[in-house]
Amino acid sequence: DAVLGEKPNQKDRLREDVSVAAGDLIAIDTLDAKPTYDGLRNAVAVGIRYIEAWLRGMGAVAIFNLMEDA
């Protein structure tokens, strides 16, 4: 509340020091850790559980003891 005040978001607060291109969002060759089969399985499981909860009208849900929200 101290930062937002009466505003609903901070979309007007741009980071001029950050430049991100579309290719940066899918570049995995620069990651310190490499993708794994277990990581993929976990991401898919979380995604499926989140979509199921979202379709039931829930915007935030605990999945594997972590909060996921839209």
Image (cartoon, helix red, strand yellow):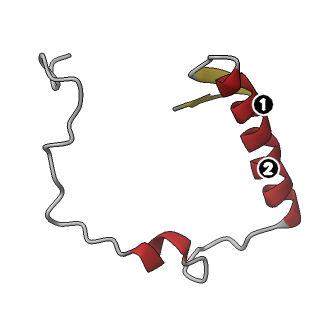
Circle 2: element type: helix
Q: Is residue 49 visible?
A: yes
Amino acid under label 1? Answer: Phe
For the point 33% across and 71% down, which residue is it? 20
Q: Is residue 66 visible?
A: no
Circle 1: element type: loop
Q: Nearer the viewer, residue 56 or 4?
A: 56
Where on the picture, by quarter, is residue 24? bottom left
Measured from the top left, where is residue 67 in percent x and y?
Answer: 62, 27
For the point 22% across and 23% down, which residue is it? 8
> Which disc, if any, is residue 37?
none
What residue does disc 1 label?
A: 64
Q: Is residue 63 above or below residue 16?
A: above
Q: Is residue 4 above or below residue 14?
A: above
Task: Return the disc, 1 or 2, that comes first in the chain's sequence.
Answer: 2
Measured from the top left, where is residue 56 in percent x and y?
Answer: 70, 17
Where on the picture, by quarter, is residue 19? bottom left
**Left or right of 51 in this view: 69:** left
| Within-10-Å neighbours for mark 1: few <14, some 14–19, many 20+ | few
Amino acid under label 2? Answer: Val
For the point 75% across and 50% down, which residue is it? 43
Measured from the top left, where is residue 45 in percent x and y?
Answer: 82, 43
Q: Which quarter of the figure is the N terminus placed in?
A: top left
> Which disc, if any, is residue 44?
2
